Image (cartoon, helix red, strand yellow):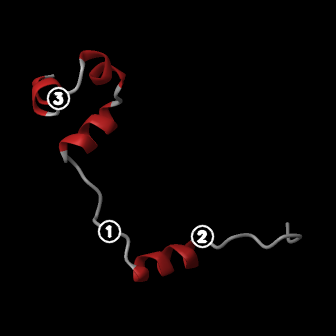
Amino acid sequence: MAAGLRGLGLTPAAFWALTPAELMLMLGVGGGGGALTRDRLDQLIAAFPDDEKGTE
């Protein structure tokens, strides 16, 4: 609570409205793997292609 109220300057209402994931993100804990690179985007596109219309 101290990190949210004092460190981040949140009001009690704003603090209690956060999900644990949102609070962790705001505190910089457990962040993602960094920025999405073009290579990683290409990997995701290949792994999860958009369905073409009419091909169900």
Q: How many marks?
A: 3
Q: Is residue 48 left or right of residue 53?
A: left
Position above or below: 40 against 2: below
- Where residue 15 appears, x then y in whole percent? 27, 23
Q: Which one is nearer the viewer's eye here, 4 or 21?
A: 4
Who comes first in sequence, dot 3 or dot 2? 3
- Where residue 4 appears, x then y in whole percent? 18, 28
Which label lies toward us, 1 or 3?
3
Give the residue at mark 2.
Answer: 48
Q: Mark 1–mark 3 contact, CB under 8 Å?
A: no
Q: Determine crowd level at label 3: few under 14, some 14-19, many 20+ residues with C-alpha closer than 10 A.
A: few
- Residue farthest to the top, as pictured: 12
Which label lies toward us, 3 or 2?
3
- Amino acid at dot 1: Ala
- Badge 3 marks a residue whose secondary structure is loop
Who comes first in sequence, dot 2 or dot 1? 1
Give the residue at mark 1.
Answer: 35
| Alpha-carbon span between mark 1 and mark 3 | 27 Å
- Badge 1 marks a residue whose secondary structure is loop
Position above or below: 39 against 10: below
